[in-house]
Amino acid sequence: MLKVDNVYKKYVQRDRGEVKSVLNNLSFFVKKGAITWLRGDSGSGKSTIIKILLRLLEYDSGKITYTFGDGHTLEYSAFSKRDNVIFRREVQYISQQPESFFDPSTIMRKSMLEVFAIHRELSRGIDLNMSLIEDVLRTVKLDSDRLDRFPHQLSGGELQRLALCRSLLVQPRLLILDEPFSMLDERNTNLIMDFLYALNKEHNVSIFLSSHNRDKICDIADEVIYC
């Protein structure tokens, strides 16, 4: 699904004028249908490679290729505007700060419905869209009354589950998660971990995540990558 080949990334420390290599010829595969765990100490470049995979950050050298849902494979550098639109739908991102995914002045119902305004090809009309949203909410054990609240009226665990719900509305092939459990208590961590495992096994959604929660991740990961 994703192939990373000898990717190198450096940063210039402006205060010292020094060049720091963050990723030094990193290579790995993200296999279709697998749960892949990215391991590494703080400062090892985990967040950097995730930003690169999401096409939010350029890399200095190397090659990354992605295989789309229709089967064609392209290097990142060869993406057209249409390829990029499809990629943004097929590959969804969840961070350790779910509040950043939502407009603080907008209730959650409106934030969820925005997905169908952006991806119009997925819209089936307001009633069916809401029905789908409520179905997805139930899978992460949230009541629909959460949709009438503002982000500040929800807990971190609820926001993380709502962020997951919104990403699933576009029917992604790959979820990329950067330390999604770091701000959660044990109950919410276990709930989301179990949900990700079920999503992978029952719906074949590929999962790529970084996490310090070693014990639980070891139980569900198919592949381990060291950064």
Image (cartoon, rainbow, N blue to C red):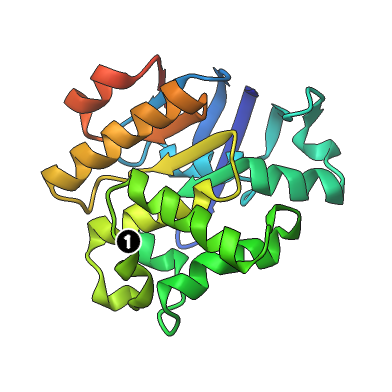
> Residue 11 appears at what percent x and percent y?
54, 48
Residue ranking furthest to the bottom: 105
Which residue is at the front of the view, 50 or 9? 50
Answer with left or right where residue 150 lies relative to residue 79: left
Quadrant of the image containing the C terminus: top left
Residue ranking furthest to the left: 186
Which residue is at the front of the view, 7 or 90? 90
Q: Residues within 10 Å of mark 1 (few under 14, many from 20)?
A: many
Answer with left or right where residue 155 lies relative to residue 116: left
Quick check: can you spot residue 9?
Answer: yes
> Residue 85 appears at what percent x and percent y?
76, 50
Q: Element at badge 1?
A: helix
Q: At label 1, which amino acid type do we have?
A: Leu
Q: Which residue is mark 1?
A: 159
Residue 218 versus residue 66 in the image, above or below: above
> Residue 118 appears at what percent x and percent y?
69, 64
Which residue is at the front of the view, 138 or 30? 138
Name the quadrant containing residue 36: top left
Quick check: can you spot residue 211?
Answer: no
Residue ranking furthest to the top: 222
Name the quadrant containing residue 80: top right
Quadrant of the image containing the N terminus: top right
Name the quadrant containing residue 142: bottom left
The residue shown at (24%, 48%) is 182
